[in-house]
Amino acid sequence: MTAIFDTHAHYDDEAFDRDREELLCSLPKQGIARVVNVGASLDSCKRTIELMDRYDYIYGAIGIHPSDTAELTEAGVEWLRQQCGHEKCVAVGEIGLDYYWDEPERKIQKNWFVRQLDLARQVKKPVIIHSREAAKDTADILTAEHAGEIGGVIHCYSYTKESAKVYLDMDFYFGIGGVLTFKNAKKLKEAVEYIPLDHIVLETDCPYLAPEPNRGKRNSSLNLPYVVSALAELKGLDEEEVRRVTWDNALKLYRMEA
């Protein structure tokens, strides 16, 4: 059976403080062969580097989440650039726009989004895009910045199949996780039916967004088989095919060796 690649996790989160080592050590035995831990703030990027250094099968992404961009400075961007040189850093992220909250103001979010896209271009790494309630501005910025030349993934994809076409035209991947198993995820299911399997990667966004039947509980990579099952059913494929294709997609997305 093909192993699973969790392309987006936050194991540095305090939700894992009580049992982090035990949980992470259990992943390879449970068929989770690789994980990318994703930075969101300067502090979480530092913790991500510690996890990369400690566990062979954990890789990292370095970047500042839109909700944390108020703290970012040019000195911070320079620090990010240096960390991107780490041999196990595979992407710049997560970066983007989040209009669910009123702060930081949108002008600040947009400024640092564009700046970090530029950073990714400089260091030749793909980007992990966070976009919540900001579909048009995200698409407009990625188009204006020719993000298709950079490459990357729309993390936790939540928009329509019409929006998906914009990102497919850029040859972006789509991160699909536990929300796909929710009964009320009609819009996402329609989008996933439309998106070709060769542009889908598996992710948890743990500790958030645990799939059914564990919705509302702390999420981890161990829940990804539920997402595989939901994706296989939606696509009319067997689960092994979904595992194999999404594994290959993750390697291509992050430009990694098999």
Image (cartoon, rainbow, N blue to C red):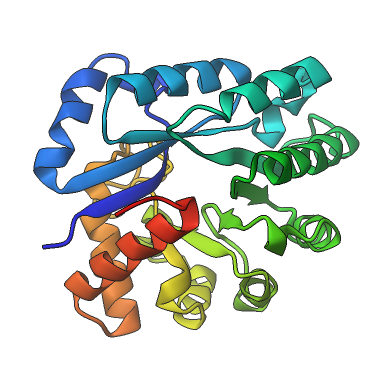
Residue at (26% x, 21% y) in the render: 20
For the image, the number of numbered tags is 0
Looking at the rendered image, the quarter that the N terminus falls into is bottom left
In the displayed structure, 228 sits above or below 210; it is below
Q: Residue furthest bottom?
A: 236
Residue 167, given in percent of the width and then of the height, sits at 65, 68
Rendering coords of residue 245 (x, y %): 32, 70
Q: Is residue 207 left or right of residue 98?
A: left
Q: Examine the rendering and report whether any part of residue 98 can be seen.
A: no
On the picture, is 171 further left or further right than 181? Answer: right
Which residue is at 25% across, 54% downward? 4
Q: From what the image shows, is residue 235 above or below residue 63?
A: below
- Residue projecting furthest to the right: 107
Question: Which residue does the image show at 78% across and 23% down from the upper left?
Answer: 70
Which percent across, then down, holds residue 92?
60, 39
Q: Is residue 159 left or right of residue 173?
A: right
Q: Residue 223, can we see it?
A: yes
Q: Nearer the viewer, residue 126 or 191?
A: 126
**In terms of image quadrants, where is residue 11?**
top left
